[in-house]
Image (cartoon, rainbow, N blue to C red):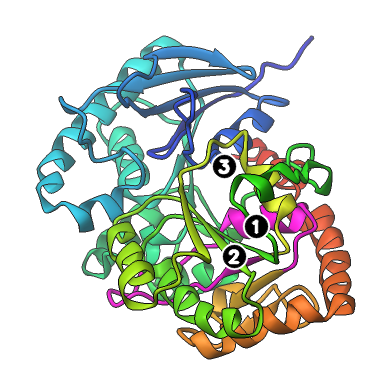
Amino acid sequence: MTKKRKKVLVLASTFPTFLEGDSTAPFVFELSKRLTNKFDVFVLAPYSSGTKMYQEKENLIIHRFKYWFGKNNLADGAILPNLKKNRLLFFQIPFFYLAQFFAIKKLYKKYDFDIIHAHWIFPQGLTAVLFKGFSTWKGTIVCTAHGGDIYSLRFLNNLKKWVINKCNDIAVVSEAIKQEILKLGVSNTSVEVIPMGVDSNRFNADKSDNSLRKKYNINGPLLLFVGRLSEKKGIEYLLKAMPGVIKHIPAAKLLVVGHGEREKKLKSMVNEQLNISENVVFTGGIPNTELPKYYASADMFIGPSIIAEDGDREGFPVSFMEAMACCTPIIISDLEIFSPYKHEKNALKTKEKSPTEIADSILRLIKDTNLQKTIVQNNTKLVETCFSAEVVGKKYINILMYN
């Protein structure tokens, strides 16, 4: 007799739209489709302008819910940065929760799912807990914390603790986040460290494309940053480091890939304060299908992450792993969340908020080809053993199988 497959409902506020030119981070989608090896998987995500309310993709059944009218919506991009940029979006929060709650209720009647896998404690984890409390559903809740939901909104720490204790299992993308959760005093839930994975079939050195150098008129080292242009990414300190790099290597050029709430300020810094517009290109958002060739074509990837003024910081950025999978050496800051990356073995580490150290590390990595090779070789092994989508998918399957 064939064993019945469990049904998993995935909740996420950040999920690809699959529209042309979409640059939404796809890590929830990539993980969810690997769960279909063992489960029937349904996804519930917010509606964005132009997206389909229902679609099937890579063995996933995807539903979307509407919670607001117009185009300037809370979950278009990332919720916390959107709230920081536009306080009026706070008015959408109760409507988001209500719409998500009733969408879950509707899907429960339709699919009778066994497990909810909620990405982010707020809003998905909280909604899942409320749904279980106010319904007849007796299934289990697994929640993945990605960083911003733990490090920010400190005034809601008691509510975070309550949500976590109501979940059957918590996964986090870094050991540092696990320690933050334990500081909350959680009691009834296990916390497992599992970073999001990277698909090495998509991200690899073979994706290198010399046409990018022609497109952006690059005749020297190609430096790359990929990420949301928000405070915690620390991009302003990389920009401030560029004059020190250009002084020694005038042909060096930095590509800044992404959009964000600090974009206007950063462009003004480049054009008016630093006068380095010839050496810095803001590409805007790049479609996910195009990203691999940017990583693979770059001479290095720089992620100068910081702790923001409100305490917010990175979880464990997928962009770093994507660069590693493409055999591109990386430069990162020395934040605790990046402890798995060893200095001079997996990356060059710089002091947080230090343009001088960033510039020195860039110059050193450009000149030291042996160091480049060492970092690439070590990171290739690290991706294979810890960060590959296959490895991460199996770990999540194990969690869900026993819940």
Quadrant hosting residue 251: bottom right
Q: Compared to 273, does 316 lie above or below?
A: above
Q: Amino acid at mark 2?
A: Lys
- Residue drawn where x is 66% and y is 36% of the image: 401
| SS for dot 1 | loop
x%, y% of residue 392? 70, 47
Q: 10 Å neighbourhood of mark 2: few (<14), some, or many (≥20)?
A: many
Residue 110, numbered circle: none
Q: Does 290 appear in magenta?
A: no
Q: Residue at label 1?
A: 218
Spot occupied by residue 361 in the image (x, y as percentages of width and height)? 66, 83
Earlier residue among tags 3 and 2: 3
| x then y, percent, for residue 66 | 25, 23
Labels 3, 2: front one: 2
* Residue 224 or residue 197, whichever sits in front: 224
Q: Which residue is mark 3?
A: 27
Which residues lie in the magenta part?
301-329
Secondary structure beneath disc 2? strand
Amino acid carrying mark 3 in the image: Phe
* Residue 313 visible in the displayed image: no
Q: Which mark is drawn over residue 253?
A: 2
The secondary structure that most of the magenta stretch takes on is loop
